[in-house]
Amino acid sequence: MLNTEMQNFFEDILANRKDTYHFAAEDLADVKAFLNKQDKIRLKVLEILKIRAIEELTGLKRFDEAGHVLPLPAPQVTVDYAEQKDGYVREHWTMETLPGIHMPLFVLIPDSVKNSAADEKHFYMLAAHGHGPGKDSVTANMKLPIWGAPRRGGAYAEIMAQNGYITFAPDMWGFGERRMTDTKPYGTSDCTQLSDAAEACGFTLLGLFVWDHMRIVDYMLAQADCEKVAMIGFSGGGEQTIYTAAMDERIAAGYAGGYLHQFKGGMLYNHMCSCNFVPELFKTMELWDVAGLIAPRPMLYENGTTDSLDGIGGIVNVEVAANHLQEMYDTCGLSGNLDTNFFDGGHMYKGDKTIPFFEKHLR
Ligand SMILES: [Zn+2]
């Protein structure tokens, strides 16, 4: 079968990957070996995401030569308007993340924070959205019931704000207010067009996502009342959380829902738009190698057992990835910093372990 030949062509590429940028048994012998391999893989992910190209274009030094994050001055923001919501004030901001690139975002400030003592410290939460109408989907601001079940995506930014976290929910490139044109229906996205354009111009869309999120982290950490920064995201937001937390060691803890799969047997065929695909990534490492860069920082991975994105093998595919990650946390002597929530359900934000997880690991 001709189609099988082509499928096998790519399967063989992934099946024959070397251990150069992959956590192998010898890399888990002790903490030193693990951290050494982490440094090597982090530099490779930095190269693959083409973040050096953004540094070259802007003259902003985001990472040192070893691939570790460098602080940048807080980006410029304007506060456009504010609305009182249920338990928090929702402000609409615009943040300049790159020269001439302006990112709209909602900043949710809990009433408990507004009423707290001036010298009290607070936890900041970066909430990344998946596909759909961008920041609206995670702030319970969806204007229409799109994409079937209205719970899809979950309003986890609002939930975090209602639990006391100062929460930033941006629109990423191609979503929400950052669609390329306003001619498409509400809730559609331009990630594929922008991903193709980015790659043809020597960037990757995922690298630009990571850059924008890291500029928010710069802003958060510049605030006098910031205790720690954490990140949460479901689906495409889970993708953004894994890659941003992998590259930005300032993120103290994270939740990634509906995204801990495997490239092999899963993402190669299951994820249909281009923002999931980065040149050379799949042939170089597995997704758990990227997620392994976050270890031993606390992470919660949540997946539905019937989520079609789990790929061939279903939830077993996800459990294999989680088991590899558990070995890394065990090696670091911090087994309890990794948590999973594999629930009976599809591609959806469940969230029943999220607040207890962050409360345990941040407070
Ligand atoms: Zn996409």
Image (cartoon, helix red, strand yellow):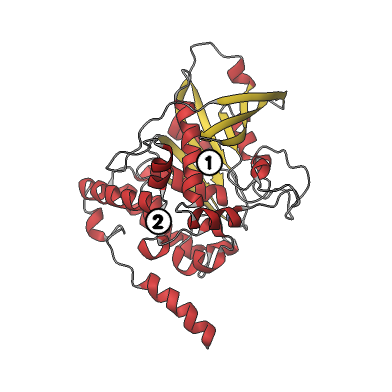
Quarter holding the C terminus? top left
Mark 1 residue element? strand
> Looking at the picture, how far across and down is residue 339, in whole percent?
45, 46
State the SS at label 2: helix
The crowding category of the residue bearing disc 1, from other C-alpha atoms within 10 Å (few below 14, some 14 to 19, many at least 20), is many
In the displayed structure, 116 sits above or below 79; it is: above
Q: Which mark is residue 358?
A: none
Query: CA gap, disc 1 to disc 2?
Result: 18 Å
Type of the residue with mark 1: Ile
Give x and y (percent) for residue 56. 39, 42
Residue in the picture at 45% in, 30% down: 218
Mark 2 belongs to which amino acid? Trp
- The residue closer to the viewer here, 164 or 235, is 235
For disc 1, the marked residue is 232
Q: Earlier in the sequence, mark 1 or mark 2?
A: 1
At x 38%, y 37%, the residue is 62
Q: Residue at x 50, y 67 (%)?
A: 268
Q: Is residue 108 above or below residue 334?
A: above
State yes or no: discs 1 and 2 in contact (Cβ < 8 Å). no
Q: Which residue is mark 2?
A: 288
> 289 and 326: which one is in front?
289
